[in-house]
Image (cartoon, rainbow, N blue to C red):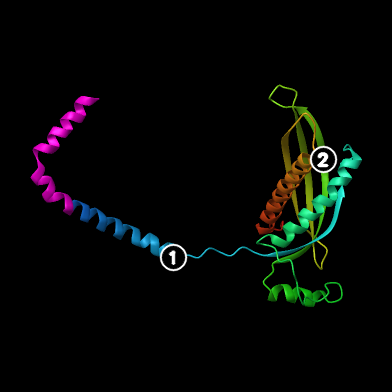
Amino acid sequence: MMAPMTARSHAFRSHPAPIRAWWPAVVGALLALFVVAGAPATAAAKGKKAKPKATYHFELSTVEGKDADADKAKLESVLPVLTKELDKAFASHEQLVADLEGAPDPEADPKGYKKYLTKKKITGSFKVNVEVTLYREELEDATSGNGDKRLVVRLELSMFGETIPDRKMGFQGEGSSTIKQDVGKKVRKRDHEFAVQSAIELAVADAMAESLQKLSEPPPAKKKK
């Protein structure tokens, strides 16, 4: 490996004057070529604006536990935490409008409500029902091999959206998560709360992403009779 490097070094030193003469010109030409080639792309990038994402309104209607095989007490204890996380997600997501201030009552004035949504550029409004279809808490041996335990929390949920005010099926999104939390010799309250909260946050984010993705897709083409 050293021989080629040495040969290249001697060659460089044997022709100092010519290199000094033509090197600035080559650099200048390359820079000019780079600027000219990059200009159209830059102009195109500036001229092309990203299409704004559609916005929606989600109202949480029900949160229910539908896993018949789950520990009933544990499942019931998770529902208030899930409800709180859903409320938080609906209020903070960039594509959701939480406050419909001044909107007509959708039941008393459905036409006025729809006009309000159009005026506010809100693509759709939905009552959302959420079902926990699977919930498990398990303790398994940690990989440390010294008797420590690991808490495993598995959560699956379904999110259904019903249009307001027409009460038609709008979307369905699925979310799931599995959290594995090393807890030592026994499960402390804060470890349990952290694992449950983490599982809920991930499952809700998963279901939200799928729901919004489905809402962004064009409706299926009607079959010809």
Mark 2 is surrounded, within 10 Å at the Cα level, by few (under 14), some (14 to 19) or many (20 or more) other residues, namely: many
| Residues tagged 2 and 1 counted as in contact (Cβ below 8 A) | no
Identify which residue, 105 or 85, lies in the foreground. Answer: 85
Residue at 77% x, 38% y: name it.
154
- The amino acid at mark 1 is Lys
Point out residue 198 in the picture as x, y percentages from the top left corner: 73, 44
Check residue 25 in the rendering and tell me which mark sits there, or answer none. none
Mark 1 is surrounded, within 10 Å at the Cα level, by few (under 14), some (14 to 19) or many (20 or more) other residues, namely: few
Count of numbered tags: 2
Viewer-nearest of discs 2 and 1? 2
The first of marks 2 and 1 along the sequence is 1
Q: Is residue 22 magenta?
A: yes
**Magenta span covers which residues?**
1-25
Residue at 16% x, 49% y: name it.
23
Residue at 69% x, 74% y: name it.
120
Above or below residue 68? Residue 32 is below
